[in-house]
Image: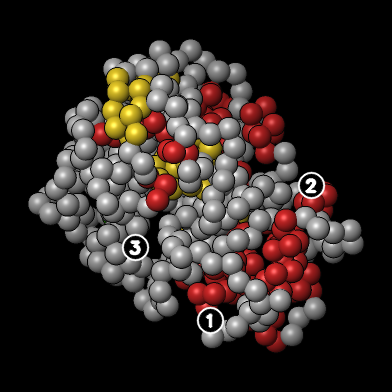
């Protein structure tokens, strides 16, 4: 029995897999499995249900199980189908089988690299620093604090903008992960023989969009404030009726790690290593909590685009931005870098492991050879950094300079973008 099937069986029997804390970047797969197993697990124990879901390992099997269950609809199932359509995910995740052969396809369509330009970049002189949580507010994966050395490198002053990404798409004809339909021929290779093909509308290109919710039941079930929206993409961040017209200077979002990597390659650059990203974000200040120092985010003047109020119900917009803000809307850090806290999460090149800091090399760490997230074992994830406009002290202080988050490389979200780096 494959790992995913083991989980499926366990969940079907009502057995639980506990995660004591899970906040921030859940996955599409997880959300869908919630829907599938809603009736098979104790309905009066939503947390238990979600915790089981968090241990799912295989999106495609789950996705197609959903589809096959929908095919024999009861009234309850019809309602659930609508719920699937209306709602979905939280921060990120692996949708590996959803898009066929993603790495090869995306790199091949990225076009030829051009000579790197340092326009819009800052030179970062290499050096040593203490990487990891300098306070006691971090998750386990931020510890232990450990010495790290990075080489000289360059990094973009701001997050890659819609205008910049549009130039890349125009030059290469690149199609992002979220713009691709599900490839059934690829998916079914990973499913039990005889799994029925889902209806066409379930395979439409889609992505994850934030929705406010005034009435949530705790912070574990992220499906309460994320929706799976057909037609959502970098050109339509909130869905087909939204637009980026007039938002040239906003960070591009709804881009997968593959999309980010393809852009950087086209620009003659690369994604930053996680160690480089944190070194740059700290701006040369040792032991500080934020890119600007230790002043709390809502003290004094607005310093970053985060969430003020009660997440995800009310946003006071004290910092003037309910969703993404134009890049460079707040003061840069000491290295001249903008939005290293808040606005949108930023993809790093590294695979994510929760225990990487226990074994990280001191010199020039580039991340682990493989990925392991105990919250979703078996789902390979890349590191994202910096927090977003959805980060709030009550939910997730992702804008802390050492805060780590992770998502599967084919996931796109409304609050996730990137910036590039280069060696020379
Ligand atoms: Ca804000």
Q: Which residue is tagged 1?
A: 45
- Rendered residue at 69%/50% (across/down): 98
- Is disc 2 surrounded by few (<14), some (14 to 19) or many (20+) residues within 10 Å? some
Q: Nearer the viewer, mark 3 or mark 2?
A: 3
Give SS at disc 3.
loop
Q: Quadrant of residue 274?
A: top left
Query: Is residue 165 in view from this perspective?
Result: no
Q: Nearer the viewer, mark 3 or mark 1?
A: 1
Q: Which residue is tagged 3?
A: 395
- Rendered residue at 33%/51% (across/down): 138
Work out which quarter of the rendered image holds the N terminus and state it: bottom right
Work out which quarter of the rendered image holds the C terminus and state it: top left
Vertical side of 329 occupied by 213: above or below: below
Q: Which residue is tagged 2?
A: 186
Please provide percent x and percent y for residue 305: 27, 50
Vertical side of 99 occupied by 60: above or below: below
């Amino acid at each position: 029995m494959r790992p995913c099937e083991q989980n499926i069986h366990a969940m079907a029997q009502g057995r639980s897999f506990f995660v004591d804390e899970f906040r921030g970047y859940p996955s599409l797969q997880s959300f869908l499995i919630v829907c599938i197993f809603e009736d098979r697990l104790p309905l009066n124990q939503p947390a238990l249900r979600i915790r089981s879901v968090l241990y799912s390992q295989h999106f495609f099997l789950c996705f197609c199980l959903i589809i096959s269950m929908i095919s024999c609809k009861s009234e309850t199932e019809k309602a659930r189908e609508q719920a699937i359509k209306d709602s979905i995910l939280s921060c990120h995740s692996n949708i590996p089988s959803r898009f066929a052969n993603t790495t090869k396809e995306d790199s091949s369509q990225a076009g030829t690299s051009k000579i790197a330009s340092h326009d819009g970049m800052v030179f970062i002189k290499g050096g040593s620093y203490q990487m990891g949580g300098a306070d006691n507010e971090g998750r386990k994966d931020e510890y232990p604090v450990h010495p790290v050395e990075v080489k000289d490198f360059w990094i973009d002053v701001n997050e890659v903008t819609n205008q910049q990404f549009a130039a890349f798409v125009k030059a290469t004809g690149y199609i992002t992960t979220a713009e691709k339909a599900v490839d059934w021929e690829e998916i079914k290779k990973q499913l039990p023989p005889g799994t029925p093909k889902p209806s066409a509308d379930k395979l439409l290109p889609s992505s994850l969009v934030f929705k406010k919710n005034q009435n949530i039941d705790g912070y574990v079930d992220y499906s309460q404030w994320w929706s799976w929206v057909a037609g959502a993409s970098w050109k339509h961040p909130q869905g087909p009726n939204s637009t980026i017209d007039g938002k040239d200077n906003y960070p591009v979002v709804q881009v997968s790690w593959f999309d980010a990597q393809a852009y950087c390659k086209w620009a003659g650059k690369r994604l930053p290593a996680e160690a480089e990203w944190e070194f740059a974000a700290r701006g040369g200040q040792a032991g500080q909590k934020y890119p600007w120092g230790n002043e709390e985010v809502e003290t004094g003047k607005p310093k970053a685009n985060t969430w003020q109020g009660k997440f995800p119900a009310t946003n006071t917009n004290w910092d003037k931005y309910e969703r993404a803000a134009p890049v460079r809307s707040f003061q840069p850090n000491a290295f001249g870098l903008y939005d290293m806290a808040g606005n949108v999460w930023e993809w790093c090149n590294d695979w994510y492991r929760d225990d990487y800091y226990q074994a990280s090399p001191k010199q020039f760490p580039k991340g682990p050879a493989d990925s392991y997230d105990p919250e979703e074992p078996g789902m390979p994830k890349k590191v994202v950094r910096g927090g977003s406009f959805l980060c709030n002290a009550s939910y997730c202080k992702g804008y802390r300079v050492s805060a780590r988050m992770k998502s599967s490389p084919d996931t796109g979200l409304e609050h996730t973008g990137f910036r590039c780096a280069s060696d020379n």
